Image (tube, rainbow, N blue to C red):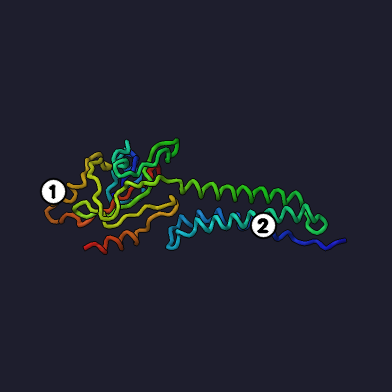
Amino acid sequence: MAISVDPPDVSRDLSKKAGYTFTILSDPNAEVIRRYDLLHVGGGPDGHDISRPAEFLVDSSRVVHWANFTEDVRVRARADEMLAAAKNLH
Amino acid sequence: MGEKRRNWAMWSGFLLALGAVLCNIILFVNLPGRHAVPWVSLLLALIALILVVRGLLLVFGQPRIYRGKVLTSIMSLVSLLLVGATIFIFFNARALPASASAPQVGQKVPEFTLADTSGQPVSLDQLFAAGANDLQASPPRAVLLIFYRGYW
């Protein structure tokens, strides 16, 4: 599931254009982003507060099995890395 | 008449400065080993800077051998702008919060309920509960939460 501060209509357009099938959630006031300590103050255009990039693989007990916090916004997670982490889950 | 030589330092400085900026495009392709590319861009920028200075010293210090003060000055300015852009982008892209309290491996993530693209509320715990609507599908064993910057 992808989470950002983008409102649902923006995410809907993005999802439609890119043909995504996964769930995209909206956190417009960055409440959940804050709870996860991922808030990037003024990181967005016009100085908006956004989320820093981060990925978590969580099991049904909400326990983290794999987490990725990039140090550089240009260095993004790769699908094969995330899938490998998911495969290691037992 | 003294021999004329090509200002190799100016040209190679320019090419490396260009290479440094183009590293950003390489990062966009998202290949394995990409973690090193930001540092490669910084290294190229640094070497480019040295070469640009060298090129300027050649054309202004040995004007009989290295010709083209105007061209060299313009090329050097462009190179310096490319070097500056590389350095600026580098520090900008890495200016991220520490996120020291973010959930780590072995910890539990906070529960949440957020709206999906249709405006329907989605809860993490509900997702893991046995699918009430779908008789065939079993609940997921795991969920991948991808927090992204947005504004795409």
Q: Chain of mark 1?
A: B
Q: Position of residue B86 (x, y in %)?
A: 55, 50
Q: Nearer the viewer, residue B152 or B57?
A: B57
**Residue B29: quadrant of the picture:** bottom left
- Secondary element under disc 1, as helix, strand or loop, is loop
Find residue B133 and name its label.
1
Q: Identify residue type, mark 2.
A: Leu
Q: Image point 83% across, 63% down: which residue?
A: B3
Q: Position of residue B101 (x, y in %)?
A: 32, 46
Q: Image point 59% across, 50% down: which residue?
A: B83
- Secondary element under disc 2, as helix, strand or loop, is helix
Q: Image point 32% across, 59% down: which residue?
A: A82
Q: Nearer the viewer, residue B89 or B67?
A: B89
Can residue A16 be seen in this snapshot? no
Q: CA distance from mark 1 to mark 2?
A: 66 Å
- Mark 2 — residue? B51
Tell me: B79 left or right of B135.
Answer: right
